[in-house]
Image (cartoon, rainbow, N blue to C red):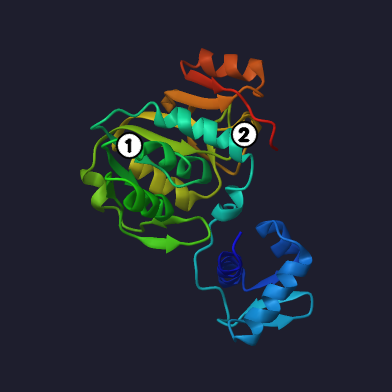
Amino acid sequence: MLEKHRQQLIKDILDQQQFASVHDLTEKLNASEATIRRDITKMSARGEITKIRGGAESINGAPKKKHIASSAFIVDKTKRVETKKLIAKCAAELCTNGGSIVINGGSSTYMMGEYLTDLHLNVLTNSFVLANYLSENSDIQVTLPGGEIYREQGIILSSYDRDSSEYFHGTMMFMGTPGIGEFGVMESDPLLIRSEQKLKKQTEKLVILADSSKLGKRSNFVFCPLSEVDILITDSKADPDLIKYFEKHDIEVIVVEAVGDE
């Protein structure tokens, strides 16, 4: 991760929770304590944050940003990269020239961008990082919903009931998840669910991208029941019994070969 990206994430984390220990930041940003301490020292010297014993504090007082309980997007991109790329490639192969699709923000769905650049598509996405990538590397027509940018997750969330997304229609919506199992497709925060449900209403099919570590996992909230999932793309390390379970719920399960990265 680039230093400027890591330091921006430190600022975002502090804006959300006001204080963070060095240990907390190392866990969230997948960096060493020495690196985090250097970042804190540099940022404190520039007056961007306040350096305190054992960590850092926001200079903005009480948290002003709404917190979303989700892992940092940039960190998530470093986990099981090769397997996620194969899942993303498989997802992109479901798209057809001239089609319209919805892509929800996330590390796995972001990786779809690399495999979509040669297609002529209309894409609605709440991922500003994916929108930026597609705009720079393809002729794809990209639509963004209005709303507030959440840098840590790389997404845009709207607090309004009506925005540009209501005029879009897509054949498929692609999204990742922190877990999928008997209770359905899980999500980490109700703010995300509200935004994602709006996107889902504009499509005909729901495609879930979930590596094998996500199968059977629970999270705090349910995005939708399994009956609303059409396709699940996972990898060959998935429990065969779980795959059969999903198939019994009329979900088409596509399995890619897992790469040995954990």
- Residue ID at (48%, 62%): 151
Image position of 7 (left or right of 173) = right
Disc 1 target residue: 118
On the image, the x and y values in percent for residue 6 come to 60, 65
Taking the image as drawn, is residue 238 in sight? yes
Q: Secondary structure at mark 2?
A: helix
On the image, the x and y values in percent for residue 84 come to 56, 36
Taking the image as drawn, is residue 179 in sight? no
The quarter of the rendered structure image containing the N terminus is bottom right
| Residue type at tag 2 | Lys
Q: Residues within 10 Å of mark 1 (few under 14, many from 20)?
A: few
Front residue of this view, candidates 63 and 237: 237
- Residue ID at (60%, 85%): 46
Q: Secondary structure at mark 1?
A: loop
- Residue ID at (58%, 72%): 11
On the image, the x and y values in percent for residue 164 come to 24, 51
| Residue type at tag 1 | Asp
Disc 2 target residue: 214
